[in-house]
Amino acid sequence: MDNIAKIITRRAEEIFDETVRLRRHFHMYPEISFREFETSKFICSFLESNEIDYVNNIAGTGIIAWINGKKGKGKVVALRAEMDALQISEKTSLEYESKNKDLMHACGHDAHMAMLMSAIIIIKEISSEFGGRVAFIFQPGEEMAPGGAKLMMETQDFRKLDPDLIIAQHVLPELDAGITGFGTGKYMASSDEIHISILGRGGHAALSDQNTDQVLIGSELVMTLREIVNEYKSDEAIVMRIGRFIAAGSTNIIPEEVSLQGTIRTFDDKARACIKERVVTACRQIEDKYGVKVKLHLPDGYPVLINSTEHVNISIELSKFINGGRMVDKLGPRMSSEDFAFYSQKYPAVFYRLGVRNKSKKISPLHSPGFVIDEKAMLTGTRTLTYLGVKFTEGC
């Protein structure tokens, strides 16, 4: 094991209690997307106490910090963590359970921030061992369109950073604690939201000649959208699902309005554009057929997340080196999405997974009120993130 790996391994263990403390602090005080005010203040205070250069208030609450290596020229490598939580009421009974009503770090962003902060501590201590720059991005609003990544990239501060490589890790409860998982190429799907309102004549359910049946119309539209995907031919997977159908009528009341919300996921940019066009057409056809008003909002969401095959393959070897070969797994593509995809569209990118599953405990999925992690996994996460950040400044 090289000297840098030895130091990182030792220091990650020595500061592990602090990593846990940081994670639990964030877990107790979650904040919603783009309103991570106290979280941002806490991180800035940490950076100041450790004498780390940074700029803040980027795209709202975002922060970019950096440490320059003392060995001269090298690459600029950015490490990213998200700050936002979800609108979920926690049901874990942890001693550090969320204190903010109906908000929860149910996607591991608390752990991501804690591991990145621990990486900062170690990288500062070994700055004489590398050249170039390691930057640290604390990003707002990953969970909410248009995505904090997109907004940060539009700022002068980010354009000035202009990284040669950007890396992020994300917890995954399907992997055992401490396993690092890597996927190459198109790793996560694009994601677009569908918002539809159908407005017509409501009234007494028994008097069908006096109203339009928005519930029936909405149901037909759901089936039509399903057929759009079934009929579209593509070599890539496509998903279009309606997850919310609100018809606030009653046993004998046809509501004036029915609302639908859903998602479109694919790895095919051409299919993504075409499917959206067909959704617009389907809504217009429903309007004409039933004489109702269909309001459609189809905002652009997140693009496909593309991992650099070259850098992922190097990351796999680096992770094997510092963690051991049995702690590395290769992963296939996922239909879930991430706004890290915006970075990956412009810069070489590595988005990898950190297993947090403890088989002796109940496993809850991401975005669930019972989501917990095996905190011991953060030892591997801190070690891996730090090592990748430093080694890639060498241009490997």
Image (cartoon, helix red, strand yellow):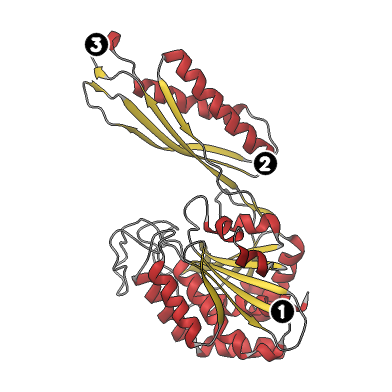
The amino acid pointed to by label 2 is Asp
Mark 2 or 3, nearer chain start: 3
- Determine the secondary structure under disc 1: helix
The residue under label 2 is 269
The amino acid pointed to by label 1 is Lys
Q: Residue at x 59, y 58 (%)?
A: 340
Mark 1 or 2, nearer chain start: 2
What mark, if any, has residue 207 been given in the picture?
Answer: 3
Q: Residue at x 57, y 61 (%)?
A: 152
**Cα distance, mark 1 to mark 3?**
73 Å
Q: Residues within 10 Å of mark 2 (few under 14, many from 20)?
A: some
Mark 1 or 3, nearer chain start: 3
123 and 97: which is toward the camera:
123
319 and 50: which is toward the camera:
50
The residue under label 1 is 391
Q: Residue at x 73, y 73 (%)?
A: 317
Decide if residue 378 is in sight here: yes
